[in-house]
Amino acid sequence: MAELIINHPGLKQTIENKKSTDLLPEQSLQWITNNKRQNTFLIRKLTEKNGIPYTGAPENLTGRNLTIAAIDTWQTERTQKLAIVNQIRSEWEAHTESDYLFKWFDGPDEKEKLSAAWKTTKAKYSHLAPHKIQLQEVEDLIIFLDSPSITTSEKILLMDSIKKQWSKNKSRAKNKDVGKKQYNFILSQKTINRLDKLAEKHDLKRTQVLDILLKMEEEKGTYIPARLKELADS
């Protein structure tokens, strides 16, 4: 580009003229950040306003750079462009007013909550969710829910449904573990071998073998007294 300008001196003045007539002042664009979700929203809105798709943009143009480039190259009168950009800004601010709905994901269970939420969301909006989509972050779910066809009211109902299902799953898991505690024992290798043989022979888990043996000994009271007698007589 630099070589082109050097070889065509008049081009520099053309660029300066275009800069003053087509480009918006930097301060009017400072509200645009590198936030992935924001730029996804803005590019969609710019496409709606000017009818130009940006799917074929150069690979090096992403995030804020792509959004700014889309605004800069939009062939419309500068005053009108500024008015529309300000309108999109207002739409973005209004759109994010419902973000309080997603505070529920904050905390150590974020990944588990996201996985559960995506199952419910994908079931409800299967027509919008490609099978290959993989959510890595909560932001990815929010971007999906930014779809123009999903209203704020629907988001509220969806999040209520997700929370209820999450509570049911946690309650079910808790009830399943009622009466169970984890204990750590140091067993001899001979005892471990015996336990493994019994588990393999009867196709049971180690814990199941121990549970059966303890239950039978509690009911019959045969083997421990006999063993103690043997040790006392020896």
Image (cartoon, rainbow, N blue to C red):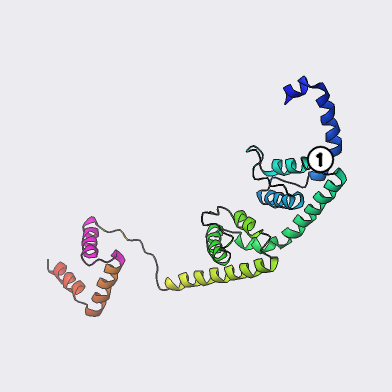
Residue situated in front as seen by the camera: 172 or 27: 27
Q: Main secondary structure of the magenta part?
A: helix
Secondary structure beneath dot 1 equals helix
Q: Amino acid at mark 1?
A: Glu
* Position in image of residue 178 (x %, y %): 43, 73
Residue depicted at 40% across the width and 68% down the height: 181
In the rendered image of this protein, does residue 50 appear above or below residue 60? below
Which residue is tagged 1?
Answer: 26
Quadrant for the N terminus, please.
top right
Task: Give the side of residue 72 with respect to residue 168, left or right.
Answer: right
Residue that appears at 64% across and 45% down: 55
Can you name the residue that lies furthest to the front here?
51
What are the residue bounds of the magenta stretch? Answer: 188-207
Occupied quadrant, residue 194: bottom left
Q: Is residue 21 left or right of residue 144?
A: right
Expressed as whole percent of the image width and height from the top left, the position of residue 107 reads 59, 59
| As drawn, 120 above or below 88 | below
